[in-house]
Amino acid sequence: MQRNTLIALHQRERLAEIGEAVNKINHEIRNVLSSAPLVSDALMGSDDPKIRRSVPHVVRSLEQAVDLCQSMLDYLVEVPPPKPDIIPINEVADELEIATGMEVIYEGPSQIFADRKIMFRILLNFAHNAGIVGATELKIDIWKAGHLDVIDILDNGPSISEDERRTLFQAFKTTKAGGTGLGLAIARDLAVALGGNLKLTHSNQDGSEFRL
């Protein structure tokens, strides 16, 4: 028991060190990214067509690096206790549409009782995850089943294969180019923090639906 406790403490210390390292890397990459527009504008004015074609790729690579670091931080940091309040869910849907550029369709009550920050993070992770595979639309439907509040989240992306379903909520397991395998793992951790759970209800050529 003592040995197991020491091992657990050592693992927590290592996770803390990893989190601190990722935070520093994230900070440095963001500093580089802040100057990227100026550099990209200069490079786009180059007389060399090869340089001009490479600019968007460089900027996307930097943005993906920032997303990866942020996902790592989100996964390593313990979810704080939720602070539920009455929130206008229509506003959350509008913010999600602005943040992702996806079309967000909402059906349900105008207000819900939940932690606004956690709820937004769950939906944002779903939108990013769906966007990576080409989805352009997210439908959110909130309804009641007895004493439970049910949130269905449906995208119009491609079908999820049987192999992908086996590791869908496992961290760092992904088959998507540019993916981290953390989006759905973090979303489920956040769902549990709210006192709920998360599962895939169906997936076909028309899209995938998850239920919180």
Image (spheres, grey):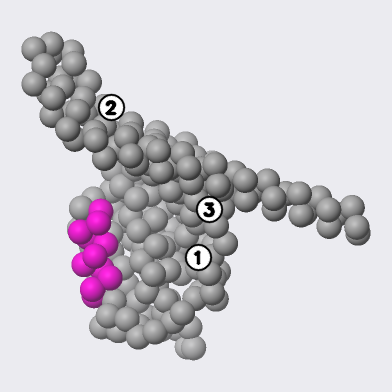
Write down the residue under mark 2.
Answer: 58
Q: Secondary structure at mark 2?
A: helix
Residue at left offset 34%, top offset 50%: 128
Residue 105: x, y in percent? 22, 66
Q: Earlier in the sequence, mark 3 or mark 2?
A: 2
| Residue type (three-letter) at the residue carrying disc 3 | Tyr
Q: Position of residue 180 (x, y in %)?
A: 46, 41
- In x, y percent, where is residue 211? 44, 67
Q: Between residues 130 and 119, which one lies in front from this camera angle?
A: 119
Residue under the image location 24 percent in, 33 percent down: 36
Inspect the image, locate mark 2, and give the three-letter code of the amino acid beneath it.
Val
Q: Is residue 75 magenta?
A: no
For this view, does 209 lie left or right of residue 33?
Answer: right
Q: Position of residue 109 (x, y in %)?
A: 28, 83
Q: Residue at x 39, y 62 (%)?
A: 121
Q: Which residue is mark 1?
A: 190
In terms of secondary structure, where does tag 1 sit? helix
Q: Which residues are magenta?
A: 90-100
Q: Earlier in the sequence, mark 1 or mark 2?
A: 2
Real-space Cα separation, disc 1 to disc 2, in angstroms: 32 Å
Left or right of 144: which side holds 41? left
Instruction: Judge the density around disc 2: few (<14), some (14-19), many (≥20) Cα neighbours within 10 Å.
Output: few
Image quadrant where residue 59 sits: top left
| Image: 158 above or below 146 | above
In the figure, residue 39 lies in which quadrant? top left
In the picture shown, does residue 177 fall above or below 169? above
Does the magenta stretch mainly form a helix, a strand or a loop? Answer: helix
What residue did someone put label 3 on? 75
